[in-house]
Amino acid sequence: MTTNTGPYTYEDAGVSIAAGNALVKAIGPLVKATQRPGADSEIGGFGGFFDPKAAGYKDPLLVAANDGVGTKVKLAIDHDRHDSVGIDLVAMCVNDLIVQGAEPLFFLDYFATGKLDNGVAERVIAGIAEGCKISGCALIGGETAEMPGMYAAGDYDLAGFCVGAVERGEQLTGEKVAPGHVLLGLASSGVHSNGYSLVRRLAADKAWRLDRPALFDQDVLLIDALIAPTRIYVKQLLPTLRAGKIDALAHITGGGLLENIPRVLPDGARAVVNADSWAQPGLMAFLQAQGAIEPEEMARTFNCGIGMVLAIAPDQVADVTAALEAEGETVMQIGEIIAGDKGCIVTGSAGTWSARASWSASHDG
């Protein structure tokens, strides 16, 4: 038992107000660089303002999303890769907004740790700011929580909150999707932000040397392939969305193609995906081989190379494909909509799997 007869301070308990203030000052330029019409206030207040009218909206519906990065954060912590998990945080939120037809407007972050390391925190928040710039939304506020005893030394966690807008009547509901619609897939940039509990389990059990070149790409370290940030699809999709050429979008996160596509389909519409219509990326093939993972398990755990799925009318395929390829996307025709119970069938040379529509948690793990 210790006895302290002197005056106690918050810093004695492990919380440095000075460090927190220094961090806010340091990230000010990062936040300012994300300003956009509708958001031009400085950080430091109790809340952040946003003016939808100044952003050009007349009768907007607001759409909100929140998410985290899952145990990919632990991979970043263990291998000093703090610079891009902030992009993941933004991506997981803004990609969920665009599937509603909404443009992301503003973002707020929550960074929690046991003891604040300003160098690490600045790197993380710089990634958040970069994600906001990529998606065109403003970082208007956040919270840094220093909580001694809650986290192991060096650990931290992240949460993100984003609000977007779509003009009334222009939101995507999936109601226009019907048998005959074509499914297009946009390539992912890697594992994105789902399935990392399995990735980390494989890394430990198979004693991977993450600091060595990847077996499937000698030009990239394995850790860099695994930590590659989630692709943000917002700016590429917005013009085509606003032109009315996309009838539904599905962000392929936890649950994979099987569980995410049905979430945006109306009753009587069933997705059929041909897994042989695109080449499995080397990283995905590596994970499957290393873990002897069954194809159905792959289809429910990882994105398998497809980060976003579009449902469009057949007569729009050429125009939409050309527009998105011009924006740098890799576009693949991966399936179609048929009549049947709402759900998804993934078929290919490795077998056939199906899932009926049900609300799916994000399975961030």
Image (tube, rainbow, N blue to C red):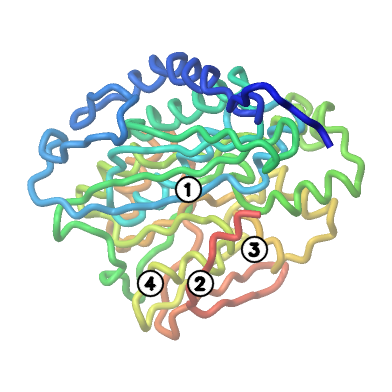
Q: Is residue 64 above or below residue 3?
A: below
Q: Which mark is residue 272?
A: 2
Return the residue at label 1: 186
2 and 1 marks in contact (CB < 8 Å):
no
- Name the N-terminal-most of marks 4 and 1: 1
Amino acid at the residue labelled 4: Leu
Amino acid at the residue labelled 1: Leu
- Name the N-terminal-most of marks 1 and 3: 1
Left or right of 169, for residue 263: right
Alpha-carbon span between mark 2 and mark 3? 13 Å
Instruction: Name the spot of residue 131 as percent of width and height, x first.
Output: 44, 31
- At numbered mark 3, what does the secondary structure look like: helix, strand or loop? helix
Q: Which residue lies at the image location 36% right of the left edge and 41% below the top edge?
A: 234
4 and 2 marks in contact (CB < 8 Å):
no
User: Is label 4 or label 2 in front?
Assistant: 4
Res. 165 visible in picture: yes
Q: Which mark is residue 265?
A: 4
Nearest the eye: 7 or 147: 7
Return the residue at label 3: 299
- At numbered mark 4, what does the secondary structure look like: helix, strand or loop? loop
User: Is label 4 or label 1 in front?
Assistant: 4
Left or right of 47, for residue 190: right
Q: Which residue lies at the image location 34% right of the left edge and 76% below the top edge?
A: 266
- Name the N-terminal-most of marks 4 and 2: 4
